[in-house]
Image: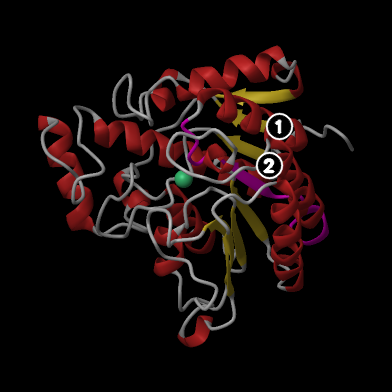
Amino acid sequence: MNKACVYIGEELARYGFGQGHPFGPDRMGVFWQAARAAGLEARVAVHPPVMADRPSIERFHTPGYVERVIGQSATGAGYLDLGDTPAFPGVYEAAAFVVGSVLDAVDRLVAGECRRAFVPIAGLHHARRDSAAGFCVFNDCGVAIETLRAVHGLHRVAYVDIDAHHGDGVFYAFEDDPELVFADLHEDGRYLYPGTGGAEETGSGAGQGMKLNLPMDMQAGDEAFFAAWDRAEAFVDAHAPEFILLQCGADSIAGDPITHLQYTPAAHAHAARRLCTLADRHCQGRLLALGGGGYNRDNLARAWTAVLAELAGAGQ
Ligand SMILES: [Zn+2]
């Protein structure tokens, strides 16, 4: 009963922008096939996706933006941002299933029904409170953070992001928040979307010093990752969070079609393993991993499977 939880189902797979798109609807299936081949299905609790209601989504997003997504979901026409994130018929429901699955995982973790959880088609870290961005319609990370506070009374939350892209939608939404511990290793914004996340961005106002941005050289591999990781881990450990979110995007692995970093899945396994230790130390074990990016299908299958294996207790 204290197994790791994972969310699998057609409703989650449906969040994608068409066959042949980097963020296509085949990503969940590719991951789950690899995880099953690794024998993980028997070692985790598999839950169906859950759809979030509108008030839950509006804990993070503005009502006006949610209304816009609902409207464009009916027609399937146009973009939800300046041109990266197209609407499609049913995009509201698909995005609401991503958020709802994450919130169901939050509920189960806080209730102690599971010790860790993984939601593969989540970690949509670019969406802003009032806009989509970079393939991200609703920012499930942001909704999870607001929900931990409003519903569960947990305020000191750590967000750790190893996706190749900077988690700008989370960073700027909580830039001045003193209790959102933010650590993000990403390809240097001089070379990659969204161009933000410089080392000098350490938070603002009351949140000054609570954010750690670690831009990585374009071709950084595992050795550089492990060195930077130690700083991120020490930062999170020092702030003793009550709950940890990990955005484990697989687009930081060598061979991704839209980024340049050169990690192997060992980086993702290491991050998950170390955060399990921190979650046990500070958070009663509560660690929620979100799949994030990853556009090379083999890479995302290997990285997410490695993360889930760690959450399920491999190597312990
Ligand atoms: Zn990414």
Give the residue displayed 77% in from the left and 48% down from the top: 276
Q: Residue furthest front?
A: 219
Give the residue displayed 59% in from the left and 76% down from the top: 210
Give the residue displayed 50% in from the left and 86% down from the top: 206
- Tell me the kind of residue under disc 2: His
Tell me the magenta residue range.
280-295
Q: SS for tag 2?
A: helix
Quick check: 221 above or below 147? Answer: above
- Tell me the kind of residue under disc 1: Ala
Going from N to C along the chain, the mark reached first, 1 or 2, is: 2
Q: How is the image coloured?
A: secondary structure
Cα–Cα span, label 1 and label 2: 7 Å
Residue in the foreground of this view, choosing between 181 and 302: 302
Is the residue indicated by label 2 positioned so its CB lies within 8 Å of ligand 1?
Answer: no
Magenta stretch: includes residue 283? yes
Image coords of residue 257 (percent x, y): 45, 34
Residue 268: assigned label:
2
- The answer to whether residue 2 is seen in the rendering is no
Residue in the foreground of this view, choosing between 205 and 165: 165
Quarter of the figure with the N terminus = top right
Please tell me how many numbered marks the rendered image carries.
2
Quick check: 73 above or below 159? Answer: above
Magenta stretch: includes residue 267? no
**Picture quadrant where residue 228 is located:** bottom right
Q: SS for tag 1?
A: helix
Image coords of residue 142 (percent x, y): 44, 56
Query: Are dots 1 and 2 in contact, CB under 8 Å?
Result: yes
Image coords of residue 175 (percent x, y): 45, 74
Image coords of residue 216 (percent x, y): 58, 59
Label 1 packing within 10 angstroms: few (<14), some (14-19), many (20+):
many
- Which residue lies under the disc numbered 1? 306
Give the residue displayed 54% in from the left and 48% down from the top: 163
